[in-house]
Image (spheres, rainbow, N blue to C red):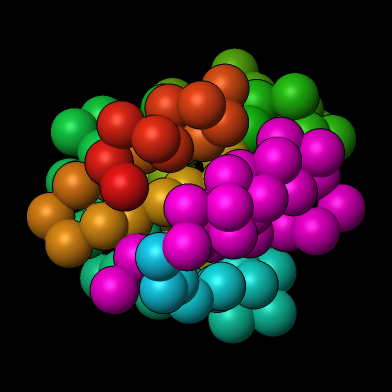
Amino acid sequence: MIEIYHNNRCRKSREGLELLEKSGKKFKIVKYLEEIPSKEELKKIIALLGIKPIDLVRRTEAIWKSDFKGKDLNDEAIITAMVNNPKLIERPIVINENKAVIGRPPSQILDII
């Protein structure tokens, strides 16, 4: 089943959700600010995306700038930062079986559904 890691306060995430709704396919919404992914889940998502953990971080967030920017963090520390501060996770993330994309721009979602 398709999953979207969604934040309703984000315009790009809402646009991604709208694309999924229009597709007519079944999907599950994961409100990741409430249902915070575990370290293991984040590692799986990062592997599916084929990126480094830092590439999933929203580096413009105030918490990143105040607490993490400029520090020498390894991948594990970056993942821990995202688990402890889920606002840092880029959005939306859409997963369809063994494929995943960050929906920026939202049209990238179409590539995997």
Judged left or right of residue 77, residue 12 is right
Q: Is the residue 73 above or below the residue 79 in the image?
A: above
Judged left or right of residue 17, residue 81 is left
Q: Position of residue 32 (x, y in %)?
A: 60, 69
Give residue 26's quadrant in the image.
bottom left
Q: Is the residue 84 above or below the residue 70 in the image?
A: below
Which residue is at 80% across, 59% downward? 8
Q: Is residue 5 magenta?
A: yes
Extent of the magenta region: 1-24
Q: Is residue 67 visible?
A: no
The N terminus, quarter of image: bottom left
Q: Is residue 10 visible?
A: yes
Which residue is at 65% across, 26% downward? 59
Q: Position of residue 29 (x, y in %)?
A: 56, 73
Q: Position of residue 9 (x, y in %)?
A: 87, 53
Judged left or right of residue 52, residue 58 is right
Q: Is the residue 99 above or below the residue 24 in the image?
A: above
Judged left or right of residue 16, residue 2 is left
Which residue is at 81% across, 39% downward? 11
